Image: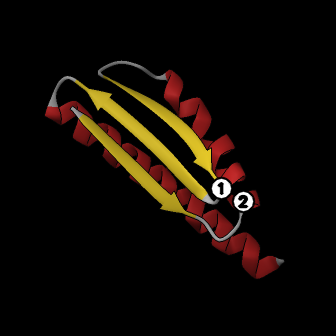
Amino acid sequence: MKATLEIAFSNPKTVRKAFKSLEQETSFKKRSNARIMVKGKVLLISIEAKEFAALRATVHSYLRLLNVVFAVVKLTEKEG
């Protein structure tokens, strides 16, 4: 089973920061594998798992992490 998340950012600098923040999460390989790539202003997260429950859990984990990334981006934009 596979899932791909495509998240658009406002600029390439922000997407690279998000990539760096999430990159280390791909090293945790228990029940699923994930790859993260950047294409322009889009962050691509490709997830593979043998079981639906593992796929769903991994997608949910990345969505939670992305929520934190967007919150930090929003906070830093207000300060800047």
Specify whether residue 67 is in view: no
Asked if the residue at tag 1 contacts the one at tag 2, i.e. Cβ–Cβ closer than 8 Å, the answer is yes
* Earlier-in-chain disc, 2 versus 1: 2
In terms of depth relative to the viewer, which is nearer, 6 or 78? 6
Q: Secondary structure at mark 1?
A: loop
Horizontal side of residue 57 vs 80, given as left or right: left
Specify whether residue 58 is in view: yes
Image location of residue 22, percent across then percent down: 58, 41
Horizontal side of residue 29 vs 22, given as left or right: left
Q: CA distance from mark 2 to mark 1?
A: 6 Å
Residue that appears at 31% across and 29% down: 48
At label 2, the amino acid type is Pro
Q: Which residue is mark 1?
A: 40
Q: Secondary structure at mark 2?
A: helix
Name the front one of labels 2 and 1. Answer: 1
Instruction: Determine which of the numbered discs, if any, sits on residue 67 in the image.
Output: none
Q: Tag 2: Cα neighbours inside 10 Å, few (<14), some, or many (≥20)?
A: some
Horizontal side of residue 16 vs 56, given as left or right: right
At label 1, the amino acid type is Gly
In terms of depth relative to the viewer, which is nearer, 8 or 33? 8
In terms of depth relative to the viewer, which is nearer, 78 or 52? 52
Residue that appears at 60% across and 65% down: 9
Q: Is residue 7 above or below residue 50?
A: below
- Residue 47, image quadrant: top left
- Residue 24, image quadrant: top right
Q: Tag 1: Cα neighbours inside 10 Å, few (<14), some, or many (≥20)?
A: few
Image location of residue 26, percent across then percent down: 51, 29
Residue most extreme to the right: 80
Q: Which residue is mark 2?
A: 12
Q: Quadrant of the C terminus?
A: bottom right
Residue that appears at 61% across and 46% down: 38
